[in-house]
Amino acid sequence: MKQSKEVHLVWISQRWKLYMKSSVMKKVGSHLLAAAIEAVIITLGCMFLALAINFARSDALALVQKTPYEIYAPCPVTAKEVEFVTADSPIIKADGSMIIDAREVDDFNKWNFPKAHNIPYDFLMPVSESYIESVLNSGAKRILIYGDGNEPDTGQELAKELAAMGVINVFYIKGGMKALKPEASHE
Amino acid sequence: MNKILTWRCHSFISLGFRIYLSYVFIAACIHKIADPASFAVDIATYDIMPLWSINIMAITLPWTELIVGILLLIGYKTRAAALIICGMMIMFIIALLIALYTELNISCGCFASQGVNYDPISYMTVLRDLVWLAMGGYIYTFGEKSFGLDNLIERKANK
């Protein structure tokens, strides 16, 4: 048993020597020490240069930070900029366009644009996931949203929120309901 | 094996890698040199380094990146520069892996002090650094013969 262990050790040491003598290791290892020494010298030189320049700067950074850095937890993006279309844009009535009314349910029931879906926008509450799913499963090529047309416009805010959630091809109709109403076919 | 090692294209490939990596490192150091305070915050967000070392690293690392980038570009002390790059890449990869393991939702801070929404760390960042590490290793092994000051100096010495 002891003998076979010794044989194994000899075999491993022979293999290791052969591997170290191989052309790849020769190529890598032949200049390693010299390159490592040069690398250390270059690194030290860079550090010295950096420290010297830092001391010369008017906005020099203190070498040792005394108080811990205040690291703020990143807030998730809840709104993303979106483009608008005007109320007379032909894409509003084009095939593949899904129209969303961002106003309150009561306002939607009083008047709505033909084939519009109602997703009431609340400035304080995030949009319900079931609404998002209905938008994503609609198969629409583009989403056009109109709101009350006030400042800030609920349609624009809903469009920004949907875009931040990853919904693409989202636009808001500039002027909202106020701009669309004369175009509407029914009231 | 010797045929592979003496392949003539190695010098061209390593020249390409040298130019690419020098561009990467010079581009990466500009914002860090311009605003070391922001870079110090980027280092601090990794929550790995002790507080006393953060500023020293924020001051010295960008200049090392710049000098190494220039050395690679001109092909002077190529092997040493490639070794430094490999060392830095190993350090960055370890930092990234620790940050990913501890599920830190932070920005890489590699090319600009952007927010996490624009430059988040991921396993793709680790993969990118591994590719750069491999390039550094390739330059170390084959870079000396490619066009550059090292090559010119060696030719002059041989004459």
Image: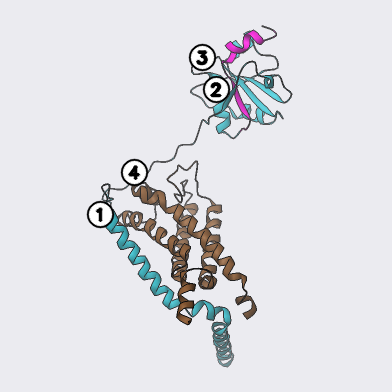
The numbered dot on residue A55 is 1
Compare marks 3 and 1 and give the one earlier in the sequence: 1
Give the colour in which the image draws chain B: brown
Which residue bears the numbered disc 2?
A: A156
Q: Amino acid at mark 4?
A: Glu
Cβ–Cβ below 8 Å for labels 4 and 2?
no
Q: Is residue A182 magenta?
A: yes
Tag 1 and tag 2 share a subunit:
yes
Which residue bears the numbered disc 3?
A: A150
Q: Residue furthest top?
A: A187
Q: Would you identify the image quadrant in which residue A99 lies?
A: top right
Q: Nearer the viewer, mark 1 or mark 2?
A: 1
Q: Amino acid at mark 2?
A: Gln
Cβ–Cβ below 8 Å for labels 1 and 2?
no
Count of marks, rendered view: 4
**x then y, percent, for residue A116:** 67, 18
**x then y, percent, for residue A185:** 70, 9
Say which residue appears at 56% left-offset and 60% top-offset. Answer: B131
**Residue at disc 4, secondary structure:** loop
Q: Say left or right for A94 vs B99.
A: right
Which residue bears the numbered disc 4?
A: A70
Chain where mark 2 sits: A
Compare marks 3 and 4 and give the one earlier in the sequence: 4
**Residue at disc 1, secondary structure:** helix
Give the colour in which the image draws chain A: cyan
In-front residue for pair A139/A90: A90
